[in-house]
Structures are given as structure tokens and as C-alpha cells.
């Protein structure tokens, strides 16, 4: 009878171990696969929403052109490309990259810290890093 109680207690402990293993596996999959994908999607959407007239872009098909009109109601953009200034209409989701450099507000540079929270040494001429 004592043997049955011990095996029941062990099976309860192994059940919790199994649940913990599944939670760790799911968390690993989330942080390795799902989270980076959602961050990338969010960054792409922000890039497409920040388009302005005059930006030079590249489509997913490799067409490079300048945005001359943005149609918000149809979620389309009009590109002007080539020497003959050919006009083409594309859906916003077809934008791959924005080639125009936009001015970003200058932010104060934070001091970078090392692995253990200590400040990293700056590479200056007084203290060069030896190769």
C-alpha cells in the first residue's frame, strides 16, 4: 500500500515537470520565432505608413521610383519611374524599402554598459585598443 502512495506522489511530481517543460518550450518558440516576426511586421507597417510624396522607394518586384501621389482610400501609391517619367500604381503592401534618407531627431547618446552593468571603456586616442 505504501508503494501505491509513493507512485501516485511521483506521478504528480512528474506531471508538474512535464507542464514546466511544455511551458519552457512554448516560451522558447515564442521568443525565437513569433516575437521577431511580429516586430518585423510592425516595422514594415510603420515604414509603409510613413511614406511621403517625393520619397524614392523600391517595390518587392525591384522597381525603383519616386512617390508622386498617395491614395489613402484605396491604399495605393503612384510611382514615377524611368527617363520618360512613366507613372505606375502600386498597392502599399508592395513596397519593399524606402531609399530616401530622412532626418531623424538627434537623441542623447546613452552610455553603453557591459554584460555585468559596468560602463564600457570608450575607444579614444589616449586609450587605443591594441590589435
Image (cartoon, helix red, strand yellow):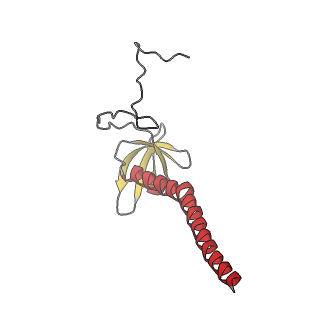
**Which quarter of the picture shows residue 101?**
top left
Tell me where residue 60 appears, x and y as whole percent. 54, 49
Please indicate, yes or no, whether residue 91 appears anywhere in the rendered image: no
Residue positioned 42% across, 15% down in the render: 127
As drawn, which residue projects farthest toward the bottom? 1
Is the C terminus in the top left, top right, bottom left or bottom right quadrant? Answer: top right
**Rendered view: 123 above or below 87:** above
**Which quarter of the picture shows residue 74?**
bottom left
Is the N terminus in the top left, top right, bottom left or bottom right quadrant? Answer: bottom right
**Rendered view: 44 above or below 99:** below
Residue positioned 29% across, 34% down in the render: 108
**In the picture provided, is 42 more to the left or to the right than 108?**
right
Please indicate, yes or no, whether residue 46 appears anywhere in the rendered image: yes
**In the picture provided, is 26 more to the left or to the right than 126?**
right
**Which quarter of the picture shows residue 18?**
bottom right
Tell me where residue 89 appears, x and y as whole percent. 45, 54
Residue positioned 52% across, 45% down in the render: 63
Front-most of 91 and 5?
5
Tell me where residue 81 appears, x and y as whole percent. 47, 42
Amino acid at each position: 500500500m505504501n508503494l501505491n502512495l509513493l507512485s501516485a506522489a511521483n506521478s504528480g511530481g512528474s506531471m508538474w515537470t512535464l507542464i514546466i517543460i511544455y511551458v519552457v518550450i512554448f516560451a522558447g518558440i515564442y521568443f525565437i520565432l513569433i516575437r521577431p516576426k511580429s516586430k518585423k511586421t510592425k516595422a514594415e507597417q510603420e515604414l509603409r505608413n510613413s511614406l511621403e510624396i517625393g520619397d524614392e522607394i523600391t517595390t518587392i518586384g525591384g522597381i525603383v521610383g519616386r512617390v508622386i501621389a498617395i491614395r489613402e482610400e484605396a491604399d495605393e501609391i503612384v510611382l514615377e519611374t524611368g527617363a520618360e517619367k512613366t507613372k505606375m500604381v502600386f498597392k502599399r503592401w508592395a513596397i519593399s524599402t524606402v531609399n530616401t534618407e530622412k532626418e531623424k531627431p538627434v537623441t542623447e547618446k546613452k552610455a553603453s554598459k557591459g554584460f555585468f552593468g559596468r560602463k564600457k571603456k570608450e575607444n579614444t586616442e589616449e586609450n587605443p585598443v591594441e590589435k
